[in-house]
Image: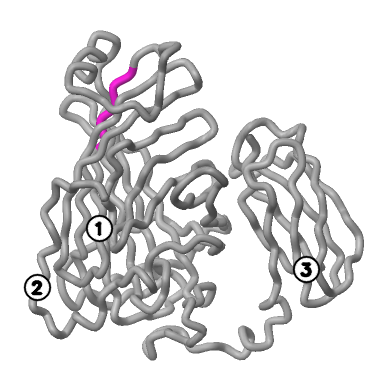
Amino acid sequence: MKTFSLSLFICLPLAAFSQQALRSEINAPREGDRLVKQSVPYRPAGASGENIVWDFRSDTLADVDYPVAYFSRANESGMIGAEPGRLLHYRLSGDSLLMTGCESPDVLIRYRNPALFIKFPVAYGDSLQDDFSGRGKHSDRLESINRGKVHTSADGFGTIVLPDSTRIANIVRLHTHQTETSRYAPIASSFDISAPTSNEEWADTARFSPPTTVLTDIYRWYEPDYRYPVFETVESCRVSGDSLIPLQKSSFVYHPFDQIADTGEDRRSTDSLPVTEEEVTDPWKDLVCLLMPNPAQTKVNVEMYLPLGAEIRMQVHTIQGFTYIRKDFGFYPEGEHSISLDVSSLPTDNYVLDVRLNDYLVNRVLMKR
């Protein structure tokens, strides 16, 4: 395991909150999980502290769903979290969740010294700090050395009111503050993204261009019995002299009723949403829809188990909504099916695949490489 340079969690003797700890077996991301987060109007993160009520009610919900999937690649260790436009690389080492890199269609970054994001268990009042470093490749033209610090704290405990007025108690908020500085140089023929970095090399890149520093704050609100957060706010900016240039301000809801604990039991808090009649009678609750291979080069197979027969239509589009592929596959009966989709004409990028089953819509992330 990596030797961490960090301030270990400071466990405060708060008996009232000890039962609300986040634990790896319940709250760590898990390979094979697929869920959807919905974009909502940006809301500032609000106050930290005890017995806080974070009220994020809104009359407007952005009608944009972002599918999220966790998977692994052959011959690669760790796990990948796929969101539209980017892949985040993780490794769960014992009780520690490490971020080992990220990639987008034009950028690949590998942290030789990964960033420690969470050390389980996590309870209100805990905090940690870690350094990370690595290399990046940008559009096959530039290489970078990347260094930074990440500080994660469970800085709040209380109740959240989601944009649709759903109220959930026993919430633990995690705040991750990341500072990452990158220095760039023309890519060399001997470039090795896994090679270690040195202080001398870091200083040498200064002759090509000034460093770029990005600050990112991610706030995630967890009800500990749900694996994933129920709300998330992301804020990032670039440092320019004495000024900060905003890059992103976004908020997302991870619908609680889409999250199922792996224990086989209903682990929802009594203060959370009850199981509704609609959920119990949902005819599509046993639906399975997987993309293989993903990333794909020429063809992707949509592997499905249909709990009932359906007319199947598919559409591939960008995050911005530009549609590349539309195809009607006709009627398929209940059971297991594999439908092949030709994606050879797609430019390299991440896309959203809409699978419409009669009037029921399923979204998946499709990565073309």
Cα separation between marks 3 and 1:
39 Å
- Identify the residue at the far right of this view: 330
Q: Position of residue 2 (x, y in %)?
A: 24, 47
- Magenta extent: 180-184
Q: Position of residue 73 (x, y in %)?
A: 55, 47
Which SS class for mark 3?
loop
Task: Work out which quarter of the rendered image holds the C terminus and state it.
Answer: top right
Which SS class for mark 1?
strand
For badge 3, the amino acid type reads Asp
Q: Earlier in the sequence, mark 3 or mark 2?
A: 2
For the residue pair 159 and 100, the one nearer the viewer reads as 100
Which SS class for mark 2?
loop
**Left or right placement of residue 59 versus residue 357 in this view:** left
Q: From the image, tell me which residue sits under label 3.
A: 359
Q: Earlier in the sequence, mark 3 or mark 1?
A: 1
Which residue lies at the image location 77% right of the left edge and 77% below the top edge?
Answer: 307
For the residue pair 162 and 195, the one nearer the viewer reads as 195
Cα separation between marks 3 and 2:
51 Å
Q: Residues within 10 Å of mark 3 (few under 14, many from 20)?
A: few
Q: Residues within 10 Å of mark 1 (few under 14, many from 20)?
A: many
Q: Nearer the viewer, mark 3 or mark 1?
A: 1
Location of residue 312 by image quarter: bottom right
Residue 175 is labelled as 1
Cα separation between marks 2 and 1:
17 Å
Which residue lies at the image location 8% right of the left edge and 78% below the top edge?
Answer: 13
For badge 2, the amino acid type reads Leu
For badge 1, the amino acid type reads His
Q: From the image, tell me which residue sits under label 2.
A: 12
Residue 37 is labelled as none
Which residue lies at the image location 48% right of the left edge and 87% below the top edge?
Answer: 265
Q: Position of residue 266 (x, y in %)?
A: 48, 87
